[in-house]
Image (spheres, rainbow, N blue to C red):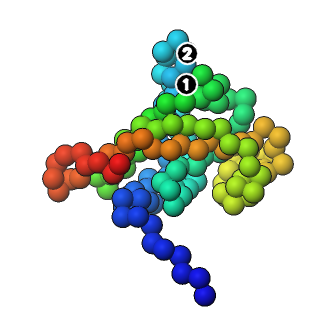
Amino acid sequence: MKTVPAYPPAIQKFKELLNDVEVCMLMTTDNGGKTTSRPMMTLDVDRDGRIWFFTNELSDKVQNASERDAVALIYARPSKNIYIHINGTCTIVRDKAKEHELWVPPLTEWFPLGLDDPKLCLIRVVPDEAHYWESTLSKMVAFI
């Protein structure tokens, strides 16, 4: 039997916090320097700490990411005192196997054609730095 090693401690803590905050604000910047934020449903934080989302390949966020791949993710759940800020690098991914792995039924609200949608693609964010608010210390703490 193969044993799967545990997640690194920082990624495990990150995953635990995100279990309580499913949606973040994804901030992108266009070539003119204008920032835009929009809510995104987090699908997974993988073993390497990469964060995954679905999107439409014709969306503004894909256009922005093709111009400038630096993004920010903001997560908040005030009722649980959870606040997370991530700066990272965004990549647009077209991988049918990964799409099947990450697909969940609620996504049909945004993608009525489901996995058959030809415009469906993934966004992968690799964190460059990540911080969360540690309420017991009343300060931001670095993950990465």
Residue 59 visible here: yes
The N terminus - image quarter: bottom right
Would residue 29 be found to the left or right of residue 103 on screen?
Answer: left
Give the percent coordinates (x, y) of residue 77. Answer: 37, 49
Residue found 19% across the figure and 46% down from its top = 139
Q: Secondary structure at mark 2?
A: loop
Instruction: Looking at the picture, tell me which residue is in the foreground, 90 or 134.
Output: 90
Crowd rating for badge 2 (residues with CA inside 10 Å; few <14, some 14–19, many 20+): few
Quarter of the image where one finds residue 117:
top right
Residue found 77% across the figure and 46% down from its top = 112
Residue found 42% across the figure and 41% down from its top = 128
Q: Is residue 43 above or below residue 24?
A: below
Give the percent coordinates (x, y) of residue 13. Answer: 36, 61
Residue with the most extreme top position: 32
Residue 83 visible here: no
Crowd rating for badge 1 (residues with CA inside 10 Å; few <14, some 14–19, many 20+): some
Would residue 50 be found to the left or right of residue 80 on screen?
Answer: right
Compare marks 2 and 1 and give the one earlier in the sequence. Answer: 2
Instruction: Tell whether label 1 touches label 2 (CB within 8 Å).
Output: yes
Q: Is residue 31 above or below residue 79?
A: above
Task: From the image, tell me which residue sits under label 2.
Answer: 31
Question: Hey, what amino acid is under mark 2?
Answer: Asn
Residue found 51% across the figure and 23% down from its top = 29
Instruction: Looking at the picture, tell me which residue is in the foreground, 87 or 79.
Output: 87
Task: From the image, tell me which residue sits under label 1.
Answer: 68
